[in-house]
Amino acid sequence: MLAQIIDGKAVAKMLREEIRLRLKKMQQNGLVPGLAVVLVGTDSASQIYVNNKAKACQECGIKSQVIRLPSSTTEEELVQLIERLNKSTNIHGILVQLPLPHQIREKVIIETIDPLKDVDGFHPINVGKLLAGNPYLIPCTPYGCLKLIEKMMPDIRGKKAVVVGRSNIVGKPMAALLLKENATVTVCHSYTQNLAEITRTADILVVAIGKPCFITGEMIKPGAIVLDVGMNRLPSGKLAGDVDFLTASERAGWITPVPGGVGPMTITMLLENTLEAAYEQKNLLRK
């Protein structure tokens, strides 16, 4: 029996419609959320991501501002720009597209963004809130993964979850979100021994390691929910995830395709975070 496909596009469309309706009410009350997206350099993949984010904002009603800077931009210049955006009352969310040119330290830039406007959820304060079980702005990709899991399995209390990958962007926050929902969580990485034995115990398997088709069907528990966060370009030009879709779909109960699975959810949760940031900042102004 083949796994059911988790249609990230369909779930994202439904959530964006909810966001659009909430935005309409916000606008009627005089609040128009604003998102500033900063792109440094001419990386082609980054340009596509930024354009997609701007398009999604426009469709939902968020006022987006794309700021394009040359690859020669210095760290100090970028810091000064972010500080101006931090002070702007029309900008509620700030996103600096990664990766950055070599002369700019990502850590410095992430920590310069006001935590209240950190819609990527990468600032140490927001990371700390997530780990403490009281999240404010959550990293968009794991946030989107959790939404997909909830559609398939509304109650994951006590379920065994395995996260393959421990990056600050996906793996670690994903584990924290699953823990908050009372799943029993194991995080695997490049030093993990007997990986297949661990992944075969998972009711929920989230894979984000950047290795095409690395997780095969024999490594999956029958009936499991499998979320593939990978996006790899094969020599043939085709896109592939970190999970071998053909063999995995013969064992899993539910599985995300690549593309069309987790990807559409990432931008959707960026919109959600921008709304959350706008609400919070408006409430602070009232106090």
Image: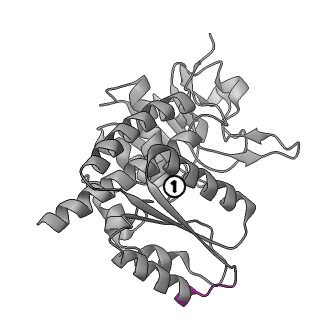
Answer whether residue 271 is magenta in the image.
no
| Magenta residues, dominant SS class | loop
Instruction: Give the SS element for disc 1.
Output: loop
Query: Where in the figure is residue 79, as x and y percent of width and height?
Result: 48, 84
Q: Which residue is mark 1?
A: 166
Q: Up-down: is 126 above or below 247?
A: below
Residue located 53% across and 90% down the image: 76
Image quarter of residue 115: bottom left
Answer whether residue 75 is magenta in the image.
yes
Give the quarter of the figure containing the N terminus: top right
Q: Up-down: is 272 above or below 218?
A: below
Residue located 37% across and 42% down the image: 178
Residue located 26% across and 52% down the image: 133
Give the quarter of the figure containing the C terminus: bottom left
> Relative to 80, is 247 on the left or the right?
right
What's the magenta region?
A: 71-76
Residue located 36% across and 46% down the image: 177
Query: Where in the figure is residue 86, as x and y percent of width and height?
Result: 37, 76
> Relative to 216, is 193 on the left or the right?
left
Query: Where in the figure is residue 168, as x and y percent of width and height?
Result: 49, 60
The residue closer to the viewer here, 154 or 86, is: 86
> Relative to 161, is 196 on the left or the right?
right
Residue 202 in view: no
Query: Where in the figure is residue 274, as x and y percent of width and height?
Result: 39, 55
The residue closer to the viewer here, 180 or 54, is: 54
